[in-house]
Image (spheres, rainbow, N blue to C red):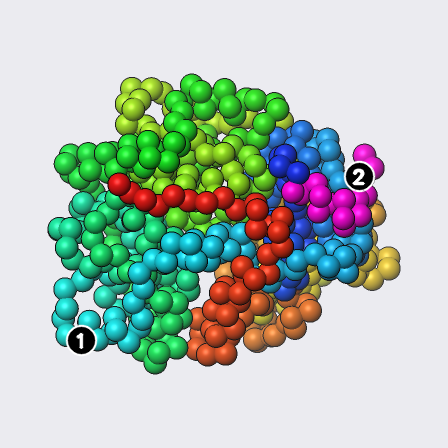
Amino acid sequence: MNARSLGAAAAKQLLHAGREIAFLDVREAAPFGEGHPLFAVPCPYSRLEVLTIALVPRAQTPLLLIDGGDGIAERAAARLAACGYADVSLVEGGMPAWAAAGYGVFAGVNVPSKTLGELLEHAHHPRTIDAATLHQWQQEGRDHLFFDARPPAEFAKMRIEGARCLPNGELAHRFAAVVPDDEVPVVVTCAGRTRGIIGALGLRAAGIRNPVLALENGTQGWALAGFPLDRGASPDEFPTLDAPARQVSRTRAENVVARNRLARTSTRAAATMLEDGERTSYLFDLRSARERTERPFGAAVPVLAGQLVQATDQYVGVRHARVILVDDTGLRAALAALFLRALGFEPHILALDDEPQVALPQTRVSALRPPATPAEITLGEALRRVQTGALLLDLRPSQAFEASRLQDARWISRPALPLALAAGTREVVLHSEDADIVAAAAIDLAEVGITTHWLAASLEACAPAGWNIDAAPRTLTRDEAIDRVWFVHDRHDGNREASLQYLAWEMGLIAQLDADERAAFGEIDLVTA
C-alpha cells in the first residue's frame, strides 16, 4: 500500500476536522520529547506495530504519521499496512515541514492532558497551599490530611513525608473511608502541577465539602523550597469500603452523572460499541487490582482513573473516539469522564454495581496482525553463533545497556536498522527480553536478507552459560540514546534549574495554543449544587 502524502497545512486541517483520526509520531522518545505537534501520539518506530494495535484498535481508522523528515514514516506506513490498517497518510517533510509552516511545536510528554490541567486551573482557580505553609502546618501539628495523587510506583520513588498514596479517582471513591468529617482540610499533591490541580477539582466535582487545597507545584515545589523528599516509601494498600462508604461513592457518582449529563452504558451495549466497524471504542477498567481479581473483566485494559486522565495519549490513540470506563460504583469513571470529555473524547460509564450478576467478557478479538515473534535460541547456541561471526546487537533499554551488557554487544535502536550495520552483515543475534522489540527489528533485517536469532535471556542468566559480562559503566550520548526522554529528565534528582524549567513549561502551555488547538478543549462545569 502506498501511503498518501499530505502537506503540513492539509494535515493540520484534517486534524481539526472533528472526525476520528490517529495522529501518530513515529520518532523515538528523545526527539518526541524535544518537540511535537500538540495532539500527536507517541508511537516510536522501535515498537510501532504492537503500540499502534493497542492505541488504534480498529483497522479502518485513518492514520496520519509524522516523522523527522527522514523517511521513517514511509517505512512505518508499510509496516502498518502489513498489520491490516487500510487508511494511512503521512505528513510530507515530517516535523521540519510542520515547524516551517509555523504550526505549534510542544516539548514534553502527555501535553494535551497537562494543557487541560492548566486551562482548568485558569478557569476554576482551585485553592492552593505553598510548600512553606504546608511545612509549617506539619511542624505545628495542625489538623489536615495529606494525599499524593500519583500511582504507587511513582509515590515509592519519592514523596513528601506524611503524604499517603491515594491516586486521583481513588481518593474521591474512598473519601468516606479515609476522611472522618466535612471540616478537616485535605491537601493533594503530585510531582508537579497537573495531577494536583485535577485532583483538587475532581474532589470539588464529586461534591466534597471539605476545604481542598492543591500543593503548589507538588514535590518539585517542595524541593525548590528547600525541604527534603522521602525516597523509597512503601505505599499502603488502598482502603476497603464498608457498605455505608460504598453507598456514599455510589450516590456521589449518580450526582456527577446527572449534573453533567454523562452517558451511562451496560455490558451488552458496550459489547455492541466495541463491535461497531464505523467507530473506535476503548474499554478501560478503572478498578484496583484487588477489585479486578474479585470480578475479572479481561477484555478491558486496566488503568487507574487518574493515570488515564494524566497520560491519555499513552492509552487512547484516536481523536474523538468513544471511551468506555468500567467501575464498580461509577464515581471513578464519572470523574474521569468529565476530563476525558473535555479532551475531546466521548466517554461512557459502565458501573458494574448496576449489573452484579452479568458475566463479563474476558477477551477482545482483533483483526489486526502484529509481527510474528522469532523463535528463541538457547544460550549456548547464541554464544556459538556470536563466536563464529554473528553480530551481537543489544535491543534492551539504553539505560540497561549503560549499566552492563554482554561483551562486544552493540546497542542499537530499530530506526537505525539495517543502514547502520556494516555492508555484508548476514547474521545477527538480538539480545532483549522484550519479544515485541525483537519481532519489530527482525522484520526490517529480514527484508534485506539478514538472518536474526533471538537471545531472550537476562544478563544474570547469560553469565553461568559462558558469556562474558561487561559491567563497566558506559555512557551513551543524547544522540545515541534516543529511546528515552531527555527533556528536563533530571528535575526530580536535585537539578534546580531543570525543575524551574519544567514548571515554567507547564505554566506556559496555554500561551502556545493557536485558535484551533484551544477550541479542541471543552469546558467543565464544576458547580456542585
Three-letter code for the amino acid on which mark 2 is drawn: Ala
Horizontal side, residue 486 vs residue 135: left or right: right
The tag earlier along the polypeptide, 2 or 1, is 2
Query: Residue 186's mark?
Result: none
427, 327: nearer the viewer: 327
Residue that label 2 marks: 3
Q: For numbered disc 1, what is the local secondary structure?
A: helix
Identify the image quadrant of residue 424.
Answer: bottom right
Q: Position of residue 250 (x, y in %)?
A: 25, 34
Q: Residue at x 44, y 36 (%)?
A: 284
Q: Which part of the image, by quadrant, shows the N terminus?
A: top right
Residue that label 1 marks: 139
Q: For numbered disc 2, what is the local secondary structure?
A: loop
2 inside magenta stretch: yes
Identify the image quadrant of residue 78.
Answer: top right
Q: Residue at x 65, y 73 (%)?
A: 477
